[in-house]
Image (cartoon, coloured by chain):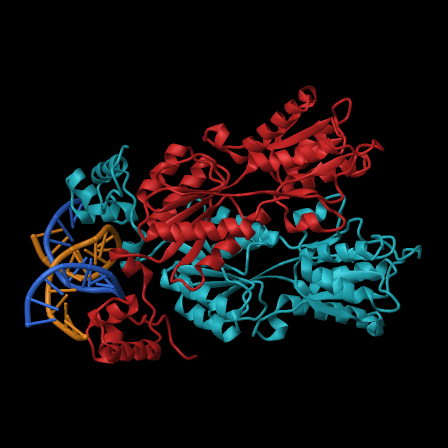
Chain colours: A cyan, B red, C orange, D blue
Amino acid sequence: MVTPNRRRRVTIADVASHAQVSITAVSKVIRNAYGVSPAMKDRVKTAIEELGYRPQAAARAMRGRTFTIGVVLPHIRNPFFADILDGLTEQLEGTDYQAIMIQGGVTRQAEKRAVDALMDRQVDGILMVGPLAAKTRLEEVGRDMPTVVLGRHERSAVYDSVVDDDDAGSELVVKHLISLGHRRIVHITHQDNSSARPADLLHIIRAEAYKRVMHEHGLQDEIAIAKAYYNEEGGYQGARELLGRSPRPTAIFAGADQAAFGALAAVHEAGLSVPADISVAGYDNTKLADLPNISLTSVDQDGAVMGSTAARLLLERVEGRTSAVRFSVNPRLVIRHSTAPPDGSPQTTT
Amino acid sequence: MVTPNRRRRVTIADVASHAQVSITAVSKVIRNAYGVSPAMKDRVKTAIEELGYRPQAAARAMRGRTFTIGVVLPHIRNPFFADILDGLTEQLEGTDYQAIMIQGGVTRQAEKRAVDALMDRQVDGILMVGPLAAKTRLEEVGRDMPTVVLGRHERSAVYDSVVDDDDAGSELVVKHLISLGHRRIVHITHQDNSSARPADLLHIIRAEAYKRVMHEHGLQDEIAIAKAYYNEEGGYQGARELLGRSPRPTAIFAGADQAAFGALAAVHEAGLSVPADISVAGYDNTKLADLPNISLTSVDQDGAVMGSTAARLLLERVEGRTSAVRFSVNPRLVIRHSTAPPDGSPQTTT
DNA sequence: TTGAAAGCGCTAACAA
DNA sequence: TTGTTAGCGCTTTCAA
């Protein structure tokens, strides 16, 4: 037994007395502030090393920053969020900032609790990924602290936005299916719990783009949308509902890969095969979509770039920027084996 | 524009003056401490409501708790972690505690940074999921604060452990394959970056159990293990390596579902079909394993129970328990369509 | 039952 | 360049 019980943490005062300097001097060194001689800096740094001193975020928070970025994720089950987080982590690497995550959950109430929890903990900035809250609430948060919102399309003057061009991405999928010769193309969208203006939500935008493109190709009578969830279960339920239509659709466009996986399950269960009997496409281009036995046609939105950009914007705000910035990534269609012309019809181009 | 710029946060002093009581009184009320009359309590609660007061964690941290539980996850790409987190969140619901997550990464150095970051932020307790650190380091953490370690098998007197019986789980899979008539059963394990004693790591235990059962059935000459990673890419690489053996194995047991998905990809790519040409099994029983077009035989370890237990143990420690507790869940084999007798051989039972 | 006051570890204004 | 000192918002003795 090396140490008996909980040991007292080394404080700035310990470092000061060990280095025989004032507390201020130590504070200046750890903050890289002006007005310290190289000699002083050395002595202090040595003392810090020797004692293994680390500043306590709580004490710093009382006067200044916590060097903490709070990230609110609805949940961690969507692998796309991992890409975002990777980009964010990479961008924060080398800075003094640390990202902490918190689950926002699937209700606005839980999400508010999560955001409040981050504010209570005095994070320096907050990144909200696909939040449910209304714009007014987001602006409330944005007024209280540096804020970046990822995945919502409204424009605000008080927080920054990072989005994918969901309208363009959705259009890519639908046009691809139409060019393969499909007409009975159906869509699985997300049943949200949001109080946002519908037009600002990515799943609504994807669904609207689907409708728009169908219209533009004279296929308005074929439009059919299942409202489920962007997850396996939702995709399964949605596909079951849509497969029950008569005549049966020849292509399913799920608004997210996770839902597309569920749709694939429903299709198999119905004794149909992909893509011979029915084509399936998703959105997000998750790693799983690339597995040969799934090989799902999907839309790639660069999550890592979204994450690193969000981090950069957040740090800029922490450093003082107050003007709002909006960043948009361009989606890219990744065609795989889950989409093909409908039963033997020749491939045509529109 | 409702508020001009960053508004000052409501403090305990604001509440006190608004309620015309002392700061101490307010403090007592928010802590549910003894010695407050119901009348006082009412007045204070009303004032808190009216002002929308929320205690600042940083200030509380200077004297007492932060009501924060820190969770270190290697990454968030493994859906099994989501199950753990769900259990943890549910258990914390209703308490004043909030869980925050931080990515530990894949190197010991990054993991240490993450743990240090949590300590700097004065979390009340820490849950480490599948850490890479050596036992000595874990005990160091455990001596400094309430600690629960999930997924590591060593026994410690200073922190609690939550584990799956990986030996039993692995045995279930291998015996299942043997009973189907397989002999050339190979295994994909994880190439770790840990400085832990090998025997304490779950992937080593799974691999050792595989070897043990093979031995027990006289199949020691068929043992073959690929060291890759517990993710899609690793499973793909590992399976490619193992499929190159001659004669070709008839069954692949991947130590994790994620790796099994990659293995399925490699098998398909090799022009083989599952389970006709080769059986594949995984571990973790993730949601994806249940999709009909994957239908992966896997081992279920109840992640939600592990997560909620971890939270319970952590809160007990925060409340003062110092004796160490170890909790183990029993794995359960879930047989699906990815495993079957090898090419037409009759099903036998061992 | 109530409240005054000290102090947690740090930052920053100010003085030397 | 260096150090003194006044808080930041809470909790917790201790006295009234």
Task: Kindly tell me whether residue A339 is visible in this rendering.
Answer: yes
Image quadrant assignment for residue B49:
bottom left
Image quadrant assignment for residue A253:
bottom right
Q: Please state, as top left, top right, bottom left or bottom right, where the N terminus of chain A lies in the image.
A: top left
The residue shown at (68%, 33%) is: B175
Count of labels shown?
0
Task: Kindly tell me whether residue A99 is visible in this rendering.
Answer: no
Left or right of A160 on screen, residue C14: left
The residue shown at (60%, 38%) is: B169
Residue A294 location (% of width, % of height): 75, 48
Residue B54 location (% of width, % of height): 34, 69
Rendered position, B333 above or below B189: below
- In the rendered image, the residue lying farthest to the top is B221
Residue D15 location (% of width, % of height): 6, 66
Residue B69 location (% of width, % of height): 40, 53
Q: Please state, as top left, top right, bottom left or bottom right, where the C terminus of chain A lies in the image.
A: bottom right
- In the rendered image, the residue lying farthest to the front is B350
Rendered position, B213 above or below B313: above
Left or right of B39 on screen, residue A301: right
Front residue of B125/A319: it is B125
Front residue of A80/B132: it is B132
Left or right of A293 on screen, residue A309: left
